[in-house]
Image (cartoon, rainbow, N blue to C red):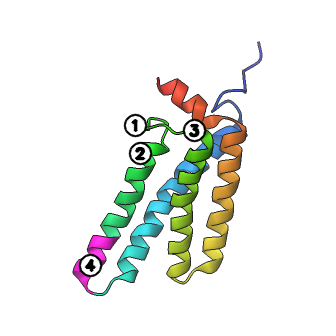
Amino acid sequence: MTKDTSTAFGSPLRVTNSVGRFLLELSALAALAVWGFNTANGIALQLVLAIAAPIAAATVWGLFVAPRARFPLPTLVRSGVELLVFGSATLAIWAVGAPALAAIFAGLAVLNMALTNHWHQWEAARAALA
């Protein structure tokens, strides 16, 4: 009997894409925290922005993008929200003085989103959690 590789986590490439997605999500949160800390003047505001920026992104992600999203969106709209979060992280990386890293992050995020949508991994993950 052959293994079904049409599921979200069936093949090594799909597993790699899923792990990569998780790492991109964590990296986006870290980038926003670093940006928040480096953008503000004064330790109090630095800490507020370093905490608030990733919390805002995580809240948006959890409400609209995550497989257990409270308000699941159609694919095109969900992709737009993903671009908003990943784009914000890209701009944050650029703003702290790492344009090459920002370009790499943006490229990986777009590739990951394209593969996730092509392989219907979000839908499969949502169905597996139902």
Residue lying furthest bottom in this view? 41
Q: Which residue position is annotated with label 2?
A: 62
The amino acid type of the residue labelled 4 equals Leu
Residue type at mark 3: give it. Pro
Q: Nearer the viewer, mark 1 or mark 2?
A: 1
**Label 4 secondary element:** helix
Q: Is residue 48 left or right of residue 98?
A: left
Left/right of residue 65 with respect to residue 62 in the rendered view: right
Q: Nearer the viewer, mark 3 or mark 2?
A: 3
Mark 1 in CB contact with mark 2 (< 8 angstroms): yes
Q: Magenta residues, as a range?
A: 42-49
- Distance from Cα at disc 1 to Cα at disc 2: 7 Å
Q: Quadrant of residue 120?
A: top right
Image quarter of residue 68: top left
Q: Which residue is mark 4?
A: 45
Residue sitting nearer the eye, 83 or 4: 83
User: Label 4 neighbourhood size at 10 Å, few (<14), some (14-19), many (20+)?
Assistant: some
Q: Nearer the viewer, residue 47 or 3?
A: 47
Looking at the image, residue 99 sits to the left or right of residue 66; the answer is: right
Q: Position of residue 78 (x, y in %)?
A: 55, 45
Q: From mark 1 to mark 4, how far is it between C-alphas?
A: 31 Å
Distance of label 1 from label 3 (alpha carbons) = 13 Å
Q: Which residue is mark 1?
A: 70
Closer to the observer: label 1 or label 3?
3
- In this rendering, position of residue 64 left or right of residue 40: right
In the image, residue 19 sits, relative to residue 36, either above or below, namely: above
Q: Position of residue 34 (x, y in %)?
A: 42, 73
Image height check: is 36 above or below 129?
below
Q: Residues within 10 Å of mark 2 (few under 14, many from 20)?
A: some
The kind of residue on which mark 1 rests is Arg
Outermost left residue: 44
